[in-house]
């Protein structure tokens, strides 16, 4: 009996798949930390015979080549992709037999990239599912702008045609298995992240690529695109020269607080992995707040100067190990050092740095008494949908280069739910600014009496 096992990477919004029948299987779009796949296959008694890439990934470093090397599997990559390593080239229409009853048929579905492939899953020759990578997602499609503005229009039209091809050539009951779309910035629009399954029939009812005409689909998709992480530009070169070995996940070198202070004073990054509420209660002055509770690697990879030495502060070895596993997925290979325990256990600074916090209910009463600056660090689409009247807008990913643009006053920082605001607040505090973190959901602003408007007051 066939089994399809998703391998979730929720912090990047992605899925890989292990598919097997009996003791023989294949893997679709494995991420770099292949020990997860190897452990799952060993647990199920599965020998991985084939590894398939749907595309040269934009948002993470692939583990496909390393997995194929570790297992002796055949590694299938589009014949048109100019990779620097040996692989089994595959093209539109090719069929690969995996077991006597299971096979995959490659289908050209450009749109997310020019060379994107989907793979129809055939059981006794009949299509029962399709692995769509960054093509047809749950209620959306992969975004077409990651290869640059010159390619966006052509890829947008191709994405529409690819979605229509899948809907036309596959039966309604065929299951849809995307790689992206679970919070990934590779998705053109964000949909319900709890969705676990879909079919071609369901997508025909709900997916804009299949319910709108081409012009309306493209207009809506392009209007909905916003900034994506800066490190994406590094992923295509990394994947065209995909690593042949798994990453080094051995424990980071432990140092003491005096060493950490020297690193901060030298301008290196020291990242505190604890929840933002622990950070504001007491932290090492000059450190940055990137809690492990949300999209840690996405935002750290987005804003850190690349090649910057990085030291991690975690309360337990497991926290540091988790952070490092997430970072190797985007190509940040080794921490300079790590420190364990809470600052109250090992910090020599007395007192520890703290940070003031507030809710949206505090904004208007405070503005009525004194001048403050409300800084909104959400992305452009969020700002344009509504914002605090009189607020200054600098998206988080621009803040490091624009700290001097923040007015010289007490700065109240907010985002949608508090995570990005805590990162921004820690950056501004490290730069010596007087900060208040609005640790609250933006949805509470209007209910709390905060004046909202649509008038852009964005510093440029």
Image (tube, grey):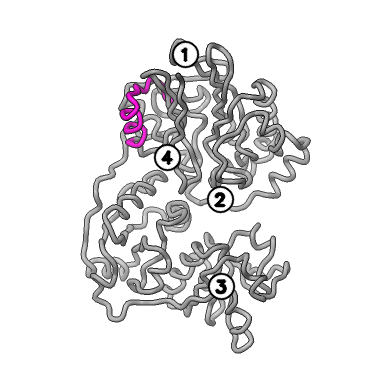
Position of 428 relative to 14 (above/below): below
- Does the magenta-highlighted stretch encompass residue 38? yes
Magenta region: which residues? 35-52
Alpha carbons under labels 4 and 3: distance apart:
34 Å
**Along the viewing direction, whichever of 200 and 112 lies nearer the viewer:** 200
Give the mark nearer the N terminus: 3 vs 1. 1
Question: Between tags 3 and 2, which lies in front?
Answer: 2
Residue name at image x 56 percent, y 22 percent: 120
Q: Which of the numbered marks, if any, corresponds to residue 61?
A: 4
Q: Position of residue 116 (x, y in %)?
A: 56, 30
Total labels: the figure holds: 4
- Mark 1 secondary-structure assignment: strand
Q: Which of the numbered marks, if any, corresponds to residue 405?
A: 3
- Mark 2 secondary-structure assignment: loop
Alpha carbons under labels 1 and 4: distance apart:
27 Å
Are the residues flagged by discs 4 and 2 in contact, CB closer than 8 Å? no
Q: Residue at label 2?
A: 228
Residue 183 visible? The answer is yes
- Does the magenta-highlighted stretch encompass residue 116? no
Residue name at image x 36 percent, y 19 percent: 23
Question: Between tags 1 and 4, which lies in front?
Answer: 1
Alpha carbons under labels 3 and 1: distance apart:
59 Å
Alpha carbons under labels 1 and 2: distance apart:
37 Å
- Mark 4 secondary-structure assignment: loop
Alpha carbons under labels 3 and 2: distance apart:
22 Å
Q: Position of residue 66 (x, y in %)?
A: 34, 31
Label 1 Cα crowd, 10 Å radius (few <14 / some 14-19 / many 20+): few
Alpha carbons under labels 4 and 2: distance apart:
16 Å
Q: Residue at label 1?
A: 97
Residue 269 visible? The answer is no
Q: Position of residue 147 (x, y in %)?
A: 57, 41
């Amino acid at each position: 009996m066939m089994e399809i096992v998703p391998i979730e990477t929720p912090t990047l919004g992605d899925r890989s798949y292990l598919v097997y029948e009996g003791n023989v299987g294949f893997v679709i779009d494995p991420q770099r930390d292949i020990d997860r796949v190897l452990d799952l296959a060993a647990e199920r008694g599965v020998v991985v015979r084939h590894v398939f890439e749907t595309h040269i990934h934009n948002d993470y470093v692939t583990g496909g080549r390393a997995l194929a090397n570790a297992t002796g599997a055949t590694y299938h990559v589009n014949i048109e992709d100019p990779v620097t390593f040996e692989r089994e080239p595959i093209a539109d229409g090719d069929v690969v037999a995996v077991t006597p009853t299971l096979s995959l048929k490659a289908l050209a579905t450009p749109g997310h990239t020019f060379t994107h492939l989907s793979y129809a899953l055939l059981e006794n020759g009949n299509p029962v599912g399709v692995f769509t990578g960054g093509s047809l997602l749950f209620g959306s499609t992969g975004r077409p702008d990651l290869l640059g503005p010159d390619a966006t229009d052509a890829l947008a039209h191709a994405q529409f045609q690819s979605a229509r091809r899948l809907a036309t050539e596959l039966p309604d009951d065929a299951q849809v298995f995307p790689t992206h779309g679970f919070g990934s910035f590779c998705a053109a629009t964000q949909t319900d992240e709890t969705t676990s399954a879909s079919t071609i029939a369901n997508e025909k009812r709900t997916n804009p690529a299949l319910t709108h005409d081409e012009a309306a689909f493209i207009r809506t998709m392009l209007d909905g695109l916003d900034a994506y992480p800066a490190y994406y530009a590094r992923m295509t070169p990394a994947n065209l020269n995909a690593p042949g070995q798994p990453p080094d996940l051995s424990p980071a070198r432990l140092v003491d607080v005096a060493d950490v202070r020297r690193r901060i004073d030298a301008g290196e990054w020291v990242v505190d992995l604890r929840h933002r509420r622990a950070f504001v209660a007491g932290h090492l002055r000059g450190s940055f707040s990137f809690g492990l509770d949300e999209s840690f690697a996405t935002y750290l990879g987005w804003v850190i100067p690349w090649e910057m030495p990085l030291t991690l502060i975690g309360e337990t070895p497991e926290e540091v190990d988790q952070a490092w596993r997430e970072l190797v997925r985007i190509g940040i290979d080794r921490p300079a050092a790590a420190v364990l325990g809470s600052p109250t256990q090992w910090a020599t600074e007395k007192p520890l740095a703290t940070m003031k916090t507030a809710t949206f209910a505090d904004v208007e009463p405070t503005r009525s008494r004194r001048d403050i600056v409300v800084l909104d660090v959400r992305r452009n689409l969020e700002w344009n949908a509504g914002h605090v009247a009189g607020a200054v807008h600098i998206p988080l990913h621009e803040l490091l280069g624009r700290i001097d643009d923040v007015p010289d006053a007490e700065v109240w920082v907010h985002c949608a739910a508090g995570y990005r605001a805590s990162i921004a607040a820690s950056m501004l505090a490290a730069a010596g600014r007087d900060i208040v973190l609005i640790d609250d959901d933006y949805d509470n602003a209007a209910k709390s009496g905060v004046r909202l408007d649509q008038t852009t007051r964005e510093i440029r």
